[in-house]
Amino acid sequence: MEPPRKGIDASPSVEPRDLLDASTDAAAVISADGVVVGWTKGAEALLGRPAPGVVGHPAARLLAVPEDPARAAGIAERCRAGMGWNGLVPVRHRDGRRIEIDLRVSAAFRMGGQECFLLSAREQRPQWTVGQSVLDGFLTRAPVGMAVMDLELRYIWLNDTLERFGGVPREQRLGRRLSELLPGLQAETLEGLMRKVLATGEPVTDYEYSGWSWADPHRQHAYSTSFFPLVDAEGTTTAVCYMVLDVTERWTARRLLSLVNEAGTRIGTTLDVLETAQELADFAVPRFADFVAVDLLESVLSTEGHGAWLTDAGPAPARPSMRRAGLQSVREGVPEAVVRIGEEVYFLPPPSDVNLLVSGEPVLIPVLDPSDALWATEQPERAARIREFGVHSLISVPMRARNTALGLATFARSLNTVPFGPDDVLLAQELVARAAVCVDNARRYTREHTAAVTLQRSLLPHALTGGTAVEVASSYQPADPTGGVGGDWFDVIPLSGARVGLVVGDVVGHGISAAASMGRLRTAVQTLADMEMPPDELLAHLDDLVLRLSDEESERAPADRGTSTFTGATCLYAVYDPVSRRCSMARAGHPPPVIVTPDGHAYYPEIPAGPPLGLGGMAFEAAEIELAENSLLGLFTDGLIEGSDGDVDSGMARLCEALARTGTDLGTLCTSAVQQLVSEPQPDDIALLLARSHTLAADQVASWDVPPDPAAVGHVRAEATRQVMDWGFPEQAITTELIVSELVTNAIRYADSPIRLRLLRDARLTCEVADASSTAPRLRHARSTDEGGRGLFLVAQLALRWGARYTAEGKIIWAEQEIP
């Protein structure tokens, strides 16, 4: 089918889709001898002739011109060859008027035994043509600015819209170049693009740029421009045309969206209130304002109390106490500021009051007049600065988040001559809203972090002493505030027999919950250690406690909060005996200790790892090693060895290297090791406990084997008394004699052999009686008629403290006395 001719249908009843739609065409079937054998409704509508008056009659009767047999024969031959034919043919309507139709004849086909041709036609309607006056009006009044420049890029024609965009009359433009008329635009760039179009003949479309024009010299506009060459009939470029569309609103919206998105990445990068306030000021200058001040309520900066006003908690104070938290200016040194960062400030733009902070809307002063009576009266010093530096426009936005008033952010313009408008208020609100959420997050986190650090430090030991068994030093660093306070702890626990317990642990998680859990575990370890439990048994009891605490928290937590916040812990517990120089230790998922021999060799002993606390159902295993005198034992948490690269093996190697320095003061060594391994804040707590072992000399220990005979009590009692006198403690001789007498007598009477008495002289005087029985001693109050049962009661009254511990061979009853 031949496509319709180009043009615009002027008939209002025909839609554009009819131009390509053949479904409504008139159709007829004509036999080879020119008789109509088929007539459609469309043909009837086109010519106004019903089928009975046409079918069976010659088709030539329908023509509005004389019949041309030769032409008809040629068309028939063409159609028999399978090529078809189309052309314009005049026909006669039933009412007598002449109609031009676009006729199409198909290839010949046979129907009912005779040769036929299918004809289809539609009326040829007149096309609409554009008159010069219409074209001139269209170009002149089009909403798109248009201009034609000659080969020297001088104006030779422009429409009214472009004249209005630039603000330069047509008469002044003609014959002159763009760079001569509008210096506020990117004239050189635009002329460069036009030269490129003239040189290549290729158009440049949708080039966007921004600038000022004489039509609106105080506001920056954005334009989208397209350039294309004008070519004459011979194909020669004679001029260049450009079209301009003002896209300021679109450009402004895109710019605002871009600023808001960028603010999301630049504001609130830390959990520090002051840094967040300063980030808001730094971001807004010079992108949005020439001067920015962020003032926060004193209560927001405080680490105590609620820290802010609830906006629905009643009236606010008459005069809010605020402090300058952020400050920035396009001028070096921020000379516009009356108040500096950290200083107390009271600024609310007149005539606003404190309700602006609680429930007010942003204040927009598009034209700021420092001579205004309110400014001169209420803010005289600021009015003077406004006048001095030419501050002419201002926006103040209250900073609120989560129903809480936080402060006020003020934006001002001076060097930027464009005053703030309603769109700028929306942007300022968005920037302040984002910063307010970050400030509130930082405020809440800082308060919780401070409380957690305070709680954690109150639970950690304030002073450590290892007695005569070990010399100790420790270092503890809380996690970087962004990581949250952890649950690391360490302790040194004096035990009987001059022994000492060393412990280090780490609770899973961060925050107040981890610090509180750490305190509970530290107390539990002290209690279990005081019960003289060996390391593996102590960890087993601690594991049961962690399981019980986890179950309790799970029961207390709401169903929608899931599992307990107490998810477990790791721990290492070691007991060092300065008499035997043996150190027994066990660990529950914790890194092994580092041991440095007196000659500086550092290594990690082979100790079974054991499961972390809180898994349950798994056993712990202890290992025992012998330490030479002046050996160094280092217990630490994983924050010390993880480092910034997270390579634990490398961190453990660095720790060995840092501690393998002989002849260094223990406190100095501890501090320098932490500084060497941790050069920047870490997301986890760091704890290091160093213990340098000592040994009790032979003249500080005395022991005797006791026969299981009551008669032996007097002999060992005399030997013990003599030894105490030889040590130079005559005041303790009588007390020692009574304690030895009672403990040895009970061992002979109730326990099994072998029985052994030992006296130890270190920070205290200790008497120990060992036997092969595992029966626990029991302190009871004897009745006045009882002949015995007062031995342990008497020992408890005479000794500073007493107790029992179990060994592989039985038990040891011990009692300690203070010595000068």
Image (spheres, helix red, strand yellow):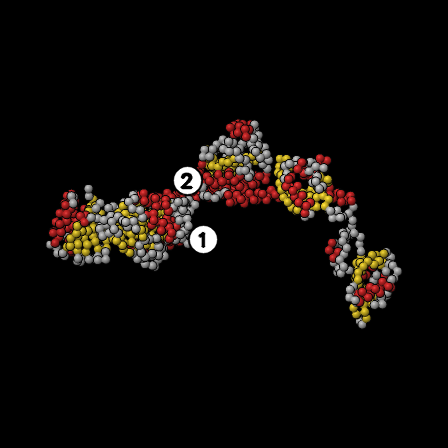
Between residues 776 and 108, which one lies in front from this camera angle?
A: 108
Tell me the crowding category of disc 1: few under 14, some 14 to 19, or many 20 or more residues within 10 angstroms, Cα based: few
Disc on res. 303: 2
The first of marks 1 and 2 along the sequence is 2
Give above or below for 72 relative to 820: below
Identify residue type, mark 2. Thr
Q: Are marks 1 and 2 in contact (CB under 8 Å)?
A: no
Q: Which mark lies nearer to you, 1 or 2?
A: 2
Q: Mark 1: which amino acid?
A: Asp
Q: Say few, some or many: other residues with alpha carbon within 10 Å of mark 2 (under 14 / 14 to 19 / 20 or more).
A: some
Quarter holding the C terminus is top left
Residue 417, position as x, y percentages in the image? 59, 34
**Disc 1 designates what residue?**
560
Q: In the picture provided, is 520 more to the left or to the right than 106? A: left
Frontmost residue, 741 versus 193: 193
The answer to whether residue 796 is seen in the rendering is no
Give the numbered dot on residue 63: none
